[in-house]
Image (cartoon, rainbow, N blue to C red):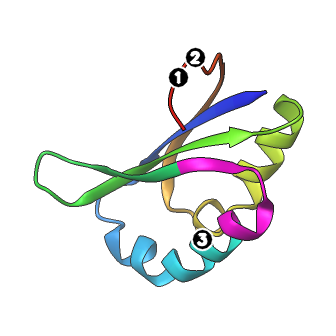
Amino acid sequence: MAYVLICRDKLGALDVRLANRDAHLAYAKASGLVRFGGPLIGEDGAMAGSLIVLDAPDRAAAEAFAASDPYARAGLFASVEIMEMKLVFGV
């Protein structure tokens, strides 16, 4: 099943994002669950969150991925929304 994660950074937390970026990318790649994703960009042009689409067996697996993400463990996110989606077209 496809799940989308919409993660919004805490204000002023760009340094946390940058400090944990390599670990986050390695975690996402090693998980085998990430179909695609990338940073959300704020109106000021700076990274302001993450959008990740997972191919996970169930919601519990999507929640576990989100909770173990190095960004989440570092306290980067103000909010994380997880929704199941029906993938109709795309990657």
Q: Is residue 9 visible?
A: no
- Of the pair 81 and 38, the residue shown nearer to us: 38
x, y percent for residue 75? 57, 63
**Mark 1, other Cα within 10 Å: few <14 / some 14–19 / many ≥20:** few
- Of the pair 21 and 28, the residue shown nearer to us: 28
Q: Quadrant location of residue 60?
A: top right
Residue labelled with disc 2: 88
Q: Is residue 61 visible?
A: yes
Q: Earlier in the sequence, mark 3 or mark 1?
A: 3
Magenta span contains residue 4: no
Q: CA distance from mark 2 to mark 3?
A: 27 Å
Magenta span contains residue 30: yes
Residue labelled with disc 3: 24
Q: CA distance from mark 2 to mark 1?
A: 4 Å
Quarter of the rendering occupied by the C terminus: top right
Instruction: Reply above or below: 84 against 34.
Output: above
Residue type indicated by callout 1: Phe
Residue furthest left as drawn: 44
State if disc 1 and disc 3 touch (CB < 8 Å): no
Q: Which residues are magenta?
A: 28-36
